[in-house]
Amino acid sequence: MRCGRGPTTAWTRRPRGSFPPVARCQQTAVCGTVRRGNPPRVVSAARRRTDELFVIWSAARAEANLALEAWRARPGRDGYLVYRAAEDRADAAEQALWELARPLSRTA
């Protein structure tokens, strides 16, 4: 069976060079759906890193918000310490995200 095109039989074979405008399979998830001149979008490593840090920051921010709500519901030293630790993690993740997004000309 050819990738994404069904079984090859005498009735489905095409003459050499008369393939439809679909790229051959190259072990990708979009096998058989890539049109010529329109390669699959490759996400850069910097973009993946930014997305990863955004997810980390978002989770840390959500955790800090939950800790704040818990501390407000039951005030006390322990609740405050948990909240501050979560807030510090969220701040550190936000700082890392900002540093990654900073233009290279400003880092020198």
Image (cartoon, rainbow, N blue to C red):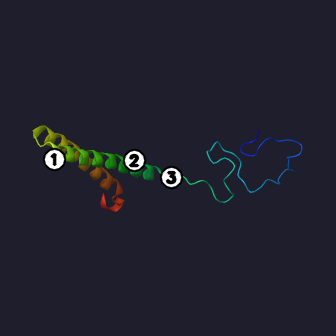
User: For the residues carrying marks 2 and 3, which lies nearer the camera in this image?
Assistant: 2
Q: Earlier in the sequence, mark 2 or mark 3?
A: 3
Q: Is residue 52 above or below residue 105?
A: above
Q: Are marks 3 and 1 in contact (CB under 8 Å)?
A: no
Q: Secondary structure at mark 1?
A: helix
Q: Earlier in the sequence, mark 3 or mark 1?
A: 3
- Residue designated by label 1: 72
The structure residue drawn at horizontal position 21% and vertical position 47%, both measured from the top left corner, is 69
Which amino acid does the dot numbered 1 rest on? Arg
Tell me the CA gap for discs 1 and 2: 30 Å
- Residue designated by label 2: 52
Q: Position of residue 49 (x, y in %)?
A: 41, 49
Tell me the CA gap for discs 2 and 3: 13 Å
Which corner quadrant of the image does residue 98 belong to?
Answer: bottom left
Which corner quadrant of the image does residue 25 belong to?
Answer: top right
Lateral position of residue 29 relative to residue 45, left or right: right
